[in-house]
Amino acid sequence: INIKLNGYPYTPLTNWQDIVNADGTVTIEAYTGNNSELTLPGEIDGKRVRTVGDYAFYSNHITEIIIPENVTYIGQHAF
């Protein structure tokens, strides 16, 4: 299924592995789904997503990813 929301790929929040940082922001550690087009969430559980962790999408077959403005750091080999 290819679902789009406002023209962007929809990615359920259940497909993300994340951690909450000491400052209350979130780091995306991995994507566990199988979609090739993703939209990173701007928030998870009311906390802003600020970071994409090292190797977060390294072994995925992603062809398109939309990253929100509030992501300020992308880790090494994230893609």
Image (cartoon, rainbow, N blue to C red):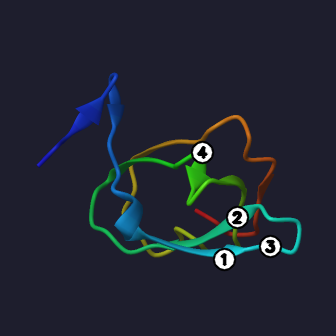
Label 4 close to label 1 by CB (< 8 Å): no
Residue at image coords 26%, 33%: 4
Outermost residue toward the left in this view:
1
Residue 78 at what x, y percent from top left?
64, 66
What amino acid is found at the position of numbered circle 2 in the picture?
Val
- Residues packed near mark 1 inside 10 Å, few (<14), some (14 to 19) or many (20 plus): some
Q: Which residue is mark 2?
A: 26
Q: What's the distance in space between the residues labelled 4 and 2, CA to CA?
A: 10 Å
What amino acid is found at the position of numbered circle 4 in the picture?
Gly
What amino acid is found at the position of numbered circle 1 in the picture?
Ile
Question: SS at mark 3?
Answer: loop
- Residues packed near mark 3 inside 10 Å, few (<14), some (14 to 19) or many (20 plus): few
Judged left or right of residue 58, residue 15 is left
Give the answer, above or below, for where 42 lies relative to 19. above
Q: What's the distance in space between the residues labelled 2 and 1, CA to CA?
A: 6 Å
Judged left or right of residue 5, residue 73 is right
Judged left or right of residue 24, residue 65 is left
Residue at image coords 56%, 60%: 45
Q: Which residue is mark 1?
A: 19
Q: In terms of depth relative to the viewer, which is nearer, 44 or 66?
A: 44
Q: Quadrant of residue 67?
A: top right
Mark number, residue 41:
none
- What is the tally of numbered marks visible in this picture? 4
Q: Which residue is mark 4?
A: 42
